[in-house]
Image (spheres, grey):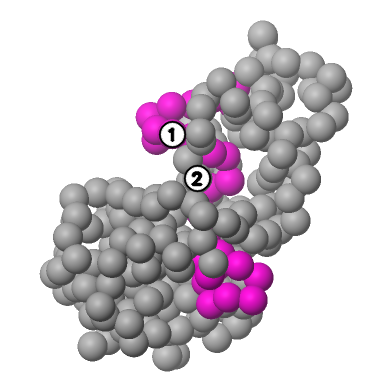
Amino acid sequence: MCNTGSKGSKDLSTKPQIDWDRIESFIGYGRHDAPVVFIGMEEGLASDQDLEEDLIRRSTYDPVIELQGGARKGQRTWRAMCDLMLRREGIIDLSSGKRNEYQAKKLGIANGDTLLTELLPYPHNKATDWLYSPYGRYSNRDEYLKGMLPKRIAMLRDLIQQFRREIIVCYGKERWDHYKKLFEGTPWRKQGLFEIADDKGTRIVLAPHFSGRAFNTNEQLAEMARVALGN
């Protein structure tokens, strides 16, 4: 339940730049009908102090946009995504340079093969944080999960089913139960660190978080690719 009238909340009438409906309906980065979909729990935030600026910027986003291109530094979560996509293209002699090049030029672009999305639309650096009650939004994370998750699950489930998907990878083991709600009725099976399912030609993978120790080495990355590609 949204707490829009709580004591100490900011006057939303003074914040016309923040479009909560647009923020809450944002899908992600890349191509909406991409064959490969990566689903996380929520985006990170560069700094808690930059939250309002970030929200104002997000209020201008279309439902699906491109990641900004250019020579981006390697980012750990994107590293695992790029590794899988390169192996999907048949490239196995991988290096950080090749992953960074894929990240800069191909990951999350409009004419590429990926869609990067999140179950939840409000960015945070830590799942234990809650930064939005001063804006008159949900007063705590539990209310947020209760109110927002069903809407987002329905939205993403519909989007996933609209197009043929080759691979869907949901990462962050603590949220596997939430991810499974995107694929109700799908039987899951354990494979190493992963749970996998196959649904009408789509390989679905539940993985540990890409930023964790499960993906420290090239062999660990290769194992995820074997699972996702069915090799």
For label 2, the residue is: 43
Which image quadrant for residue 6?
top right
Q: Is residue 123 above or below residue 168?
A: above
The magenta region covers 106-133
Whether residue 62 sits left or right of residue 35 in the image: it is: right
Residue 153 is a magenta residue: no
Q: Is residue 131 magenta?
A: yes
Instruction: Name, please, the residue furthest toward the top.
Output: 8
Element on which disc 2 rests: loop
| Amino acid found under the numbered disc labelled 2 | Glu
Is the magenta region chiefly helix, strand or loop? loop
Q: Position of residue 47 (x, y in %)?
A: 51, 27
Gap in Å between the C-alphas at discs 2 and 1? Answer: 8 Å
Identify the image quadrant of the C terminus.
bottom left
Q: Where in the figure is residue 89, as x and y percent of width and height?
A: 39, 85
The amino acid pointed to by label 1 is Asn
Residue 101 placement (x, y as % from top left): 45, 65
Name the disc covering residue 224, or none: none
Image quadrant in which the N terminus is located = top right
The answer to whether residue 191 is visible is yes
Up-down: is 122 above or below 30?
A: above
Against 144, residue 116 (above or below) is below
Label 1's element? Answer: loop
Q: Which residue is mark 1?
A: 125
The one of 156 and 222 positioned closer to us in this rendering: 222
